[in-house]
Image (spheres, rainbow, N blue to C red):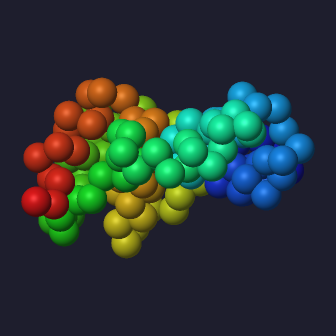
Amino acid sequence: MPPGGAPALECLEKNKAKVSAGCAKAVNAAFGGGAAAPASAAAPAAEAAPAAAPAAIVLRPLLPREELFIVRSACGADIRTLCAGVAPGGGRIIQCISNRAASLSPACKEVLAPFAAR
């Protein structure tokens, strides 16, 4: 399997029981799950997770020019890093970054804030 991109991330997700704790934490964050908890605290952490920072940002419907603004703004680096394997079109890239709110840079979160559903 070539490194990087969605296929590699999906492979890691399927096999996360076999990877290091740090790798599993990164895979969980990439899938919008935030940080992985130690095995002994898995159940209490799962209940507390919704109270933590949101794993996804719910955006209102966007115009194509608004999507383009987001892609070309401070979110460009986040998109290249977190959504490398996502095909453009149909709002898939915007959906990808909104589902990975926990991993976004502060600058990208600031760009997305005015487009959040209220």
Q: Is residue 83 visible?
A: no
Q: Position of residue 60 (x, y in %)?
A: 17, 64
On screen, residue 22 versus residue 30, left or right, reads right
On screen, residue 48 versus residue 69, left or right, reads right
Q: Position of residue 1 (x, y in %)?
A: 85, 50
Front residue of 11/34: it is 34
Above or below for 21 versus 16: above
The quarter of the rendered structure image containing the C terminus is bottom left
What residue do we see at 36% from left, 29% from top?
105
Q: Position of residue 71 (x, y in %)?
A: 31, 46
> Which corner quadrant of the image does residue 36 belong to?
top right
Q: Position of residue 76 (x, y in %)?
A: 37, 37
> Which corner quadrant of the image does residue 88 belong to?
bottom left
Count all numbered tags in the image, as a single digit: 0
Above or below for 58 versus 114: below
What residue do we see at 84% from left, 47% from top?
17
What residue do we see at 79% from left, 47% from top?
16
What residue do we see at 89% from left, 44% from top?
18
On screen, residue 32 versus residue 41, left or right, reads left
On screen, residue 60 versus residue 78, left or right, reads left
